[in-house]
Image: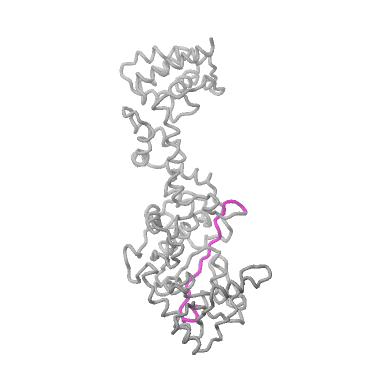
Amino acid sequence: MEIRTRFAPSPTGYMHIGNLRTALYEYLIAKSQNGKFILRIEDTDQERFVEGATEIIYNTLNMTGLKHDEGPDIGGEYGPYIQSQRMGMYMDYAKELIKKGHAYYCFCTKERLDTLKSSNEKGDAFSKYDRHCLTLSQEEIQKNLDAGMPFVIRQKMPTEGTTTFHDVVYGDITVENAELDDQILMKADGFPTYNFANVVDDHFMKITHVVRGSEYLSSTPKYNLLYDAFDWEAPVYVHLPAVMRDAHNKLSKRHGDKSFEDLINEGYLPEAVVNYIALLGWSPSDNKEIFSLKELEQCFNISGLSKSPSIFDIKKLTWLNGEYIKNMDAESFYILAENRLKNAIKNTTLDLKKIAVLLQKRLETLNDIPRLVDFFDALPEYSTDLYIHKKMKTTEEIALSSLKAALPVLENITDWTENNIHDALMSLVQTLGIKNGQLLWPVRTALSGEPTSPGGAMELADILGKEESLKRIKIGIEKLQNTLS
């Protein structure tokens, strides 16, 4: 049997982390077993439709490498792959359930349903519809239909016994049928509800594995009863525990938690985000933490899924992102960083590729670039306290002496290259009989004016050029002299 999974998002806005994790696991379940991964757009909730949201879905899947085998944009044997384009079939199958005695017309008005709600002494929403319309005669039903009275179609739940289903993550789950509400299958606007449409679509698209959040566990018995009513085979269920902000709160955009787009805009790499999300609820058989998507396809096993909620740790993602940046080849990194470097550094005479080499091993996110390179354009205002470094054994007095000694040595370099700068400064260290840091720290500080920088004295001097480097060292000498005078 071919494994077929589907990612079926609703175009209602951004792609949150839980949605992306669901898509990733569906993709991996299929690809790890040479199956098919299908994209289906579930747009039947017209009130929540957001313009541009479908493009966000496509862009996210494209950026993460989760390539679907069938979908609205590429077609397939079981299309259409947009629910609103499959509208004719849902009503037909809902009416088939009515004929079989598993569903019924409901003509209750909003006012009546509101009355049921208000009649609850606590004012809570009623837990179950009271089946007021279940006993309508065929003549009454036809009369209402002929009169054009608005209606919904409700699923008729059994009132006795239990319904049991098996979930890969949570095991066997049994519910009392008496607790199940007669859920709406077709709404008054003629659109199917999510609960009904996805059952019909999953069946006709031959979906074998359904992956979704654990919040849908309570709805699954209703899905199974629909499968039974149609005499269809139910899929394998894989319910995922929540992704949490902390031990008590789920991730939520409303509370400021980040979407996939937010993370990309903040300088995280799509590959790193995918890698991290894969580990939010799945454990590999070894202790490995860094996986390419291809490696995940090869080693993913559904048995590694956990039923425990996972906490989204931005610090762990940031570390992982930094590892991805460090492990890139230099040319790929430069291509990735080029636009940010050009936006941050206006001096077009500087060699951006040399700056990129310095940055690559020091970045955690791409958005760190402007903060780390702004001194290349202009020396910032800084305090001479920066010259004091306990580990380097420098004081303001030592720094002033070192800069005064370095200035003529650097002035005498005719071929300004990193190697020549290195040789000249290291020779000066020997001549002065001091530690390397007692010369190199003051030079680096004078060149950058920052407490830290993406390169040392030689690299910065090489990139800044002879004229600018000498100018900055002279500024450093003047600052130190004014402080010490």
Give the vertical position of 142 relative to 347 (above or below). below
**Region in magenta:** 226-247
Q: Quadrant of residue 82?
A: bottom left
Q: Position of residue 194 (x, y in %)?
A: 47, 69
Q: How is the image coloured?
A: one colour
> Left or right: 251 with respect to 36?
right
Q: Nearer the viewer, residue 272 or 343?
A: 343
Q: Residue furthest right?
A: 121
- Seen at 39% across and 34% down, the residue is 344
Q: Nearer the viewer, residue 293 or 478?
A: 478
Q: Nearer the viewer, residue 296 or 89?
A: 89
Q: Quadrant of residue 380?
A: top left
Q: Nearer the viewer, residue 189 or 373?
A: 189
Q: Position of residue 34 (x, y in %)?
A: 39, 64
Give the vertical position of 434 relative to 336 (above or below). above
Taking the magenta stretch, the answer to whether it contains residue 132 is: no
Give the vertical position of 404 relative to 137 (above or below). above
Count of marks overlaid on the render: 0
Taking the magenta stretch, the answer to whether it contains residue 240 is: yes
Q: Position of residue 12 (x, y in %)?
A: 45, 59
**Quadrant occupied by the N terminus:** bottom left
Q: Position of residue 22 (x, y in %)?
A: 47, 60
> Left or right: 97 with respect to 346?
right
